Image (cartoon, rainbow, N blue to C red):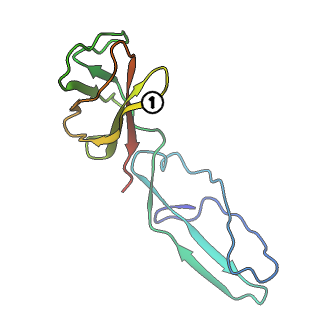
Amino acid sequence: LARAGANATACASWTSTGGAPSAVLQLSAMLPADVLVTGGQVVAHVRATNGAGLSSSATSNAMNVYVSPPGLGRLIVQGMSENVSCFLNDTSAIAVAWLPDEESFLPGTAAYALSVIESTSEHALLAERLVISSTNATNVSFAAADGVTVRFRLVVTNVAA
């Protein structure tokens, strides 16, 4: 594993016996601090050498490295952003918005998926679905029995190029 365009920063060796045509190697690597920033890139380089000294190698595409997931400042349901319960009396679509915090990635570099879940049974009243991140808001409709407590869940995932 190496910084894109730089010398290797971590390596490991292993020996195989027999005629197995493939092997799996897992390696933990320590990367320099300057790589561990949003958009830092690494490449994986593998070289195999047989007992006769013949070798072959392969290098991966550059992969982005992120030190932390995108943050989420607040989830706002029907205009309320505090961590309090509220009654949703309206049968029409419910407005849901979110405010990314200062560590979040810009819209378009993260994927947002929203679901509505019954609190007691974890039953999904609205299955997880992708929502448009550029507006940071959407309207949702779902059916629930009177008195049911629900939770709105927004999952933010890095979209590594």
* Residue nearer the viewer, 60 or 123: 123
Query: What residue is drawn where x is 73% and y is 68%?
Result: 13
Say what secondary structure mark 1 lies in: loop
Q: Can you name the residue that lies furthest to the front here?
A: 145
Please, what is the three-letter code of the amino acid marked with disc 1? His
**Mark 1 surroundings: few (<14), some (14-19) or many (≥20) residues within 10 A:** few
Q: Quick check: 78 left or right of 121?
A: left
In terms of depth relative to the viewer, which is nearer, 93 or 16? 93
Image spot of residue 8 (x, y percent): 59, 64
- Image height of 85 relative to 144, above or below: above
Which residue is rendered at x = 19% and y = 36% of the image? 135
Q: Name the one closer to the observer, 9 or 18.
A: 18
Q: Is residue 151 above or below residue 59?
A: above
Q: Quadrant location of the N terminus?
A: bottom right
Q: Does the image show residue 104?
A: no
Placement of 149 over or under 116, stated as above or below: above
Going 46% across and 62% down the picture, which residue do you hit?
Answer: 4
Total numbered badges shown on the rendered structure: 1
Residue 3 lies, with reference to residue 131, above or below; the image says below
- The answer to which image quadrant residue 104 occupies is top left
* Percent coordinates x, y for residue 145 in the rendering: 34, 19
The residue wearing badge 1 is 123
* Quadrant of the rendering where the C terminus is positioned: bottom left
11 sits left or right of 97 in the view: right
Horizontally, is 63 left or right of 53 in the view? Answer: left
Q: Position of residue 126 (x, y in %)?
A: 34, 34
Is residue 52 something one can see in this rendering? yes
| Residue 79: % across, % down | 22, 16
Which quadrant would residue 25 be assigned to in this image? bottom right
